[in-house]
C-alpha cells in the first residue's frame, strides 16, 4: 500500500494559473510562489465582493482517537466529488503547523487519494505565513521588553506582562522561562513564556480580519501587559502596530493550491481548535463564497471544539450562515470509544460499537442546537462490516440526520459522490436556520457555563481564584460582551482526556482566563491543556528524511 506522500509525489499537478482559471481568476490576480502555489490579490477580493454567495458546508467530526477519523480527508474528498458532479466547488482549509508535523502527526494535508498538493510544501514552510506570524509576535515581545529597559514611560509592571513569545514547534522546555539574565544591559529579569505559533493572538487576528484596515485595528488593541496602576497596555501604546502589519502584509492574502483532482483549495490560517478558535481565515472563506457555488470548509478537532467555535466565534463575527454540516465518524473510532483497544479495532464488535456510539449521539445533539442540517458520514475502512455500518446508518436516521458512506481515501472524488449527493439533496430539501448558542449580553461566566453544560454535558464549572479575578478584570475593562474561546482537550467531551464516550457527572475546571482583545474573544483554559505542546517519546521527526534528489520521505 502506498503512503500518502508517495501518492502525492506521483500526482501530476496542474499549473496553479490553470486551476485559478476554473474560478475565473486571471493570472494578474495571482502572486505566484513557483508553479503550483499562489496568493490571491487584494484587488481580486474588491472585484468579486458583490458576487452572490455560494453555499457553505462545514465539515466537523466526533472526538479524535488514535484510530483516526479523517476530517480533512473527507473535506478534500467531498470537494473533489462536487467536481465529479460538475459543480463549481472550492475548499477553504487551515494550514498545518510544523510543530505537530514533526511531533505527533507527520503531516496534515488529507490522506490517500483525497489530498491537497503540493503536500510537502504545505506541511513544511508553504508560503511563509506562519513564519510571518511568528516574527510579528516576537517583534511585539522585543518592543515590549525594550520599552521596559529604555525608561518604561508607560509604567509597565513586569509582573503583569501577558504577551508571550511564540515558536512554530512543539518545545515543552520553553513553556516557562526566565529572560533578561546577564548584565544590566541585557534587560529586566522576569518570568516569560512561549506558546506555539498557532496559539498566538496574531494567528487569531489574521484569521478574523476582513482587510488590512481591520487587521491594524485588531493588532493595535491587543493587550500586552498592565501598568502598575492596572491599566491595560496595548500594541498601539508601544507603537508596534505598523511594523507588525508590514510583516503580515503578504500573510493576510489567502493561498491557492489544488487537490489531487485539481479542485481549487484556499489554505489559509491555522489555529488549533483545542487551544484557539480552530477555523481557517474569514478572508479565505468569504473569497471562496464569492468565487464558487459551494465552499467546503473544516473546523479543528471534534464538534465540541471546532464546530462550536466556528459557529459561536467565526460565524458570529463574520456574518456567515452555513447551509449544511457534515459530521465525520469511523466505525473504528466509535469502537474505541466503546472500550476496544487500538490493536483490536479491526475485529467485528457490534456490542462495543453500540456502547461507543454515544459519542456520535452527543455530537449530533450538539449540532442540532445550531439549526444547520446534518449529514453524518462514515469514513470507511476495509475492516468495517456491513452489520456495523448498517447499525450506524439506522442510528443516524432515527435522529433526523442524513447518512452517507465515504470512501474518499481509497477512491478520491469518486468515493465521495454518495456524500456529495446527500449534501446537494440537503441544500434542496432542508432549510438552514442557523443560530448561535448564546447571546453576547450574557456574562462571561454564563457563556462558559452554557458551553460546558450544553455542549460538553458537564454538571457545572469550577474556577481557580486567579481565573475568577481575571474574569472580573476583563468585565470591568468592558470586554464582558466578547464570545468565549474554550481551550480544552480534544480527546474527550470533558476536560479529562481519558473520559471517552459520553461522560456524565463531571465539572469543567477553569484554571486560567485571558482577554484576546484584538481577536475579540476571551480565552478560557481548562483542565491540563497546554498552549505549548511537547514532543512524544518517538517524534514524527525521527521518520522524516530527504534523499540526494530532494525527495522527502516520512511525511504521512
Image (cartoon, grey):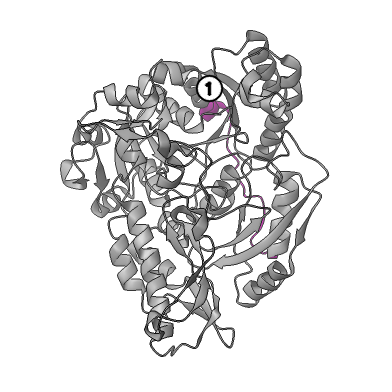
Q: Dot 1: few (<14), some (14–19), or many (≥20) neighbours within 10 Å?
A: some
- Looking at the image, residue 513 sits to the left or right of residue 351; the answer is left
The verdict on residue 429 being magenta is yes
Residue 465: quarter of image: bottom right
Which residue is outermost to the right?
505
Please give the name of the residue rendered at 27% of the width and 21% of the height, measured from the top-left corner.
10
Question: Where does the N terminus fall, quadrant-wise?
Answer: top left
**Could you say where residue 86 lies in the image, as x and y percent from the top left?**
35, 22
Residue 327: quarter of image: top right
Q: Report helix, strand or loop for mark 1.
A: helix
**Count of number-bearing discs:** 1
**Could you say where residue 103 lies in the image, as x and y percent from the top left?**
47, 42
**Could you say where residue 433 lies in the image, as x and y percent from the top left?**
60, 41
- Looking at the image, residue 36 sits to the left or right of residue 528; the answer is left
- In depth, the one of 433 and 92 nearer the eye is 92
Please give the name of the residue rendered at 16% of the width and 42% of the height, measured from the top-left corner.
27
Question: Where does the C terminus fall, quadrant-wise?
Answer: top left
Please give the name of the residue rendered at 49% of the width and 60% of the height, measured from the top-left corner.
174
- In depth, the one of 401 and 451 nearer the eye is 451
Magenta-drawn stretch, dominant element (helix, strand or loop): loop
**Could you say where residue 399 lies in the image, as x and y percent from the top left?**
71, 26
Q: Which residues are magenta?
A: 425-443
The verdict on residue 307 being magenta is no
- Residue 98 vertical placement versus 223 (above, below): above
Which residue is outermost to the top?
386
Residue annotated with mark 1: 422
- Residue 419 vertical placement versus 543 (above, below): above
Q: Could you tell me if residue 236 is visible in this image?
A: no
Please give the name of the residue rendered at 39% of the width and 22% of the height, measured from the top-left corner.
3
Amino acid at each position: 500500500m502506498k503512503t500518502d506522500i508517495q501518492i502525492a509525489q506521483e500526482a501530476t499537478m496542474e499549473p496553479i494559473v490553470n486551476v485559478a482559471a476554473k474560478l475565473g481568476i486571471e493570472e494578474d490576480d495571482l502572486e505566484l510562489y513557483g508553479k503550483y502555489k499562489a496568493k490571491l490579490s487584494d484587488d481580486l477580493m474588491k472585484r468579486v465582493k458583490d458576487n452572490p454567495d455560494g453555499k457553505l458546508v462545514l465539515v466537523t467530526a466526533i472526538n479524535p482517537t488514535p484510530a483516526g477519523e479523517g476530517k480533512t480527508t473527507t473535506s478534500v474528498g467531498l470537494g473533489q466529488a462536487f467536481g465529479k458532479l460538475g459543480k463549481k466547488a472550492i475548499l477553504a482549509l487551515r494550514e498545518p503547523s510544523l510543530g505537530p508535523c514533526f511531533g505527533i502527526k507527520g503531516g496534515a494535508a488529507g490522506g490517500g487519494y483525497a489530498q491537497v498538493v503540493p503536500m510537502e510544501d504545505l506541511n513544511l514552510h508553504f508560503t511563509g505565513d506562519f513564519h510571518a506570524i511568528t516574527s510579528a509576535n516576537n517583534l511585539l515581545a522585543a518592543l515590549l521588553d525594550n520599552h521596559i529597559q529604555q525608561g518604561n514611560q508607560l509604567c509597565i509592571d513586569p509582573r503583569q506582562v501577558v504577551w508571550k513569545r511564540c515558536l512554530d514547534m512543539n518545545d515543552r522546555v520553553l513553556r516557562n522561562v526566565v529572560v533578561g539574565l546577564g548584565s544590566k544591559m541585557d534587560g529586566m529579569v522576569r518570568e516569560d513564556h512561549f506558546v506555539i505559533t498557532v496559539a498566538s493572538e496574531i494567528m487569531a487576528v489574521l484569521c478574523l480580519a476582513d482587510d488590512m484596515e481591520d487587521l491594524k485595528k485588531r493588532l493595535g488593541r491587543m493587550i500586552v501587559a498592565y501598568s502598575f496602576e492596572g491599566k491595560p497596555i496595548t500594541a498601539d501604546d508601544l507603537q508596534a502596530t505598523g511594523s507588525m502589519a508590514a510583516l503580515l502584509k503578504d500573510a493576510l492574502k489567502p493561498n491557492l493550491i489544488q487537490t489531487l483532482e485539481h479542485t481549487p483549495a484556499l489554505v489559509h490560517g491555522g489555529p488549533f481548535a483545542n487551544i484557539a478558535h480552530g477555523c481557517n481565515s474569514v478572508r479565505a472563506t468569504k473569497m471562496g463564497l464569492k468565487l464558487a457555488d459551494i465552499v467546503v470548509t473544516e473546523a479543528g478537532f471534534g464538534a465540541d471544539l471546532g464546530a462550536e467555535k466556528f459557529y459561536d466565534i467565526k460565524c458570529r463575527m463574520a456574518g456567515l450562515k452555513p447551509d449544511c454540516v457534515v459530521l465525520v465518524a469511523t466505525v473504528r473510532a466509535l469502537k474505541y470509544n466503546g472500550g476496544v483497544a487500538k490493536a483490536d479495532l479491526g475485529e467485528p464488535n457490534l456490542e462495543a460499537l453500540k456502547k461507543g456510539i454515544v459519542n456520535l449521539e452527543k455530537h449530533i445533539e450538539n449540532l442540532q442546537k445550531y439549526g444547520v442540517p446534518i449529514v453524518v458520514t462514515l469514513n470507511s475502512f476495509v475492516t468495517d462490516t456491513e452489520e456495523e455500518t448498517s447499525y450506524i446508518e439506522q442510528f443516524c436516521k432515527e435522529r433526523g440526520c442524513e447518512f452517507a458512506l465515504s470512501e474518499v481515501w481509497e477512491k478520491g472524488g469518486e468515493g465521495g459522490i454518495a456524500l456529495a449527493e446527500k449534501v446537494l439533496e440537503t441544500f434542496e430539501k432542508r432549510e438552514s436556520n442557523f443560530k448561535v448558542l448564546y447571546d453576547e449580553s450574557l456574562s462571561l461566566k454564563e457563556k462558559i457555563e452554557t458551553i460546558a453544560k450544553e455542549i460538553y454535558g458537564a454538571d457545572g464549572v469550577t474556577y481557580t481564584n486567579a481565573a475568577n479575578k481575571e474574569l472580573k478584570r476583563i468585565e470591568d475593562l468592558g470586554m464582558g460582551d466578547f464570545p468565549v474561546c474554550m481551550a480544552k482537550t480534544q480527546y474527550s467531551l470533558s476536560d479529562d482526556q481519558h473520559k471517552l464516550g459520553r461522560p456524565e457527572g463531571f465539572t469543567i475546571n477553569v484554571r486560567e482566563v485571558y482577554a484576546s482583545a484584538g481577536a475579540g474573544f476571551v480565552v478560557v483554559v481548562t483542565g491540563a491543556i497546554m498552549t505549548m505542546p511537547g514532543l512524544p517519546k518517538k517524534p514524527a521527526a525521527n521518520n522524516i528524511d530527504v534523499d540526494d534528489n530532494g525527495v522527502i520521505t516520512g511525511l504521512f
